Image: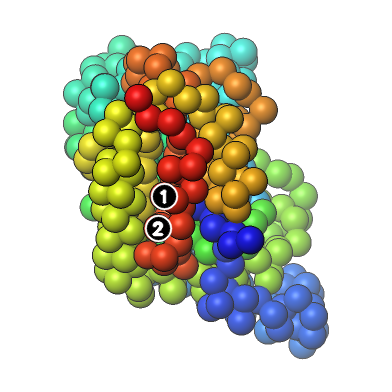
């Protein structure tokens, strides 16, 4: 049976560049970067080079990049240190942000959640108004939503808020490696990213922290222990994963234009083919999405049911966020955009990746034709 993977927003396969870069550090170059002898030197140099590569890819300085265990840790670190007093966020953030906000509220912090407009976009003006309710705090708005793929106007938000008083964080986990990301033009102080979303390994990510913010007393280590990561994130570095993440990001940044063209072409082919067999299929978002991202409803069908039958036919898609796969309720994202129930309960998230082909799209559509009945 042919197996087709179209769930790249959940995770992506490791690219060759990452695998090649990682291999030496999984076996022969195993030195601990913190040791003083010669075994450590290669690992230490590799971590330093990875930091430089990542910084260059997002327009930052190397000493503004802190390695973490992934997007979840980066979000928790940013919010639970610099957002303890007042956070302005949106109703459709990832749970790494939303549940950090709940923890902050439980400890007496204030959280305002702005609503999301129908098409899946946060209104920058609404975020700015919410910041005027108190003197200072942290704004946290994702750069791209993980269920809808909608790219948010983070630049517009950071321009509208008082940056002398308010810090700007963005969860860019879905965006980094897929669209141009530059911390200066976005105007962000903090940015979270995760290796496995851009063809790097799992369990590694980074938090960008603007140099000017690093001196603030609220910016504290999230994990206490040794002096790794300039004393800000203790624990022996996962050298192979860090090196793999940097190689994957460099590969994606160098191939960004061709990747975007390829993904756009696959998406157009898919939508055209679906429309020709199923005129009732409903696109939840029409514009402003990440490349290769489709959120589509098949009214009258159960998304879960369709997902499982497609899986039996060798096609992997999602019915919402992967971390929500045990939760059969309408997702908080689809609720936030007030998607009518008939669409919300029948929504599939199809996210193409660079290794997908036109033939695979054709095969996927054939599998859908056999699976969904369109009335
Ligand atoms: N933020 C967003 C927008 C995500 O999509 C995800 C993962 O799905 C995360 C954070 C969490 O990242 P990680 O899996 O690296 O912990």
Q: Position of residue 110 (x, y in %)?
A: 47, 14
In terms of secondary structure, where does tag 2 sit?
A: helix
The residue to which callout 2 is attached is 362
Foreground residue among 313 and 340: 313
Q: Are marks 1 and 2 in contact (CB under 8 Å)?
A: yes
Q: Residue furthest bottom?
A: 38
The residue to which callout 1 is attached is 365
Q: Tell me which residue sits at (49%, 42%) in the image.
A: 370
Foreground residue among 90 and 51: 90
Q: Position of residue 162 (x, y in %)?
A: 24, 30
> What is the total number of numbered labels drawn onto the structure image?
2
Q: Tell me which residue sits at (26%, 22%) in the image.
A: 117
In the rendered view, does 257 fall on the left or right side of 167? left
Q: Is residue 340 visible?
A: yes
In the rendered view, does 153 fall on the left or right side of 360? left
Q: Measured along the vertical axis of the image, is residue 331 above or below residue 1? A: above
Q: Tell me which residue sits at (43%, 21%) in the image.
A: 300
In the rendered view, does 38 fall on the left or right side of 244? right
Gap between marks 1 and 2 measured at Cα: 5 Å
Q: Quadrant of the C terminus?
A: top left
In terms of secondary structure, where does tag 1 sit?
A: helix
């Amino acid at each position: 049976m042919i197996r087709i993977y179209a769930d790249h927003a959940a995770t992506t396969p490791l690219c060759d560049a990452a695998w090649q870069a990682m291999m030496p550090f999984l076996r022969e170059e195993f030195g601990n970067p913190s040791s003083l002898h010669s075994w450590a030197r290669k690992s230490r140099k590799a971590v330093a080079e990875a930091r430089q590569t990542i910084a260059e890819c997002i327009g930052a300085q190397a000493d503004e990049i802190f390695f973490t265990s992934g997007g979840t840790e980066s979000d928790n670190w940013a919010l639970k240190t610099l957002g303890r007093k007042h956070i302005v966020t949106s109703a459709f953030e990832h749970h790494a942000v939303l549940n950090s906000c709940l923890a902050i509220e439980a400890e007496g912090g204030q959280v305002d959640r702005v609503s999301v407009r129908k098409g899946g976009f946060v209104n920058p003006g609404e975020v700015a108004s919410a910041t005027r309710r108190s003197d200072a705090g942290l704004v946290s708005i994702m750069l791209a939503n993980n269920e809808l793929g909608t790219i948010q106007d983070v630049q517009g938000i950071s321009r509208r808020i008082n940056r002398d008083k308010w810090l700007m964080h963005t969860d860019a986990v879905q965006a980094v490696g897929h669209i141009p990301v530059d911390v200066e033009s976005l105007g962000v102080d903090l940015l979270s990213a995760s290796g496995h979303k851009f063809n790097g390994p799992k369990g590694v990510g980074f938090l960008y922290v603007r140099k000017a913010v690093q001196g603030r007393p609220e910016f504290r280590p999230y994990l206490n222990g040794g002096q790794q990561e300039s004393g800000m994130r203790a624990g022996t570095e996962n050298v192979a994963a860090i090196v793999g993440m940097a190689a994957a990001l460099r590969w994606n940044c160098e191939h960004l234009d061709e990747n975007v063209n390829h993904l756009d072409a696959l998406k157009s082919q898919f939508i055209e083919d679906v429309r020709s067999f199923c005129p009732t299929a409903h696109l939840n978002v029409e514009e402003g999405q990440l490349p290769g991202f489709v959120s589509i409803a098949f009214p009258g069908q159960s998304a879960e049911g369709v997902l499982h039958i497609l899986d039996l036919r060798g096609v992997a898609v999602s019915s919402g966020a992967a971390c929500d796969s045990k939760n059969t309720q309408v997702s908080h994202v689809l609720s936030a955009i007030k998607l009518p129930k008939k669409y919300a309960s029948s929504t599939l998230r199809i996210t193409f990746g660079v290794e997908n082909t036109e033939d695979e799209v054709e095969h996927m559509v054939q599998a859908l034709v056999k699976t969904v009945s369109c009335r």
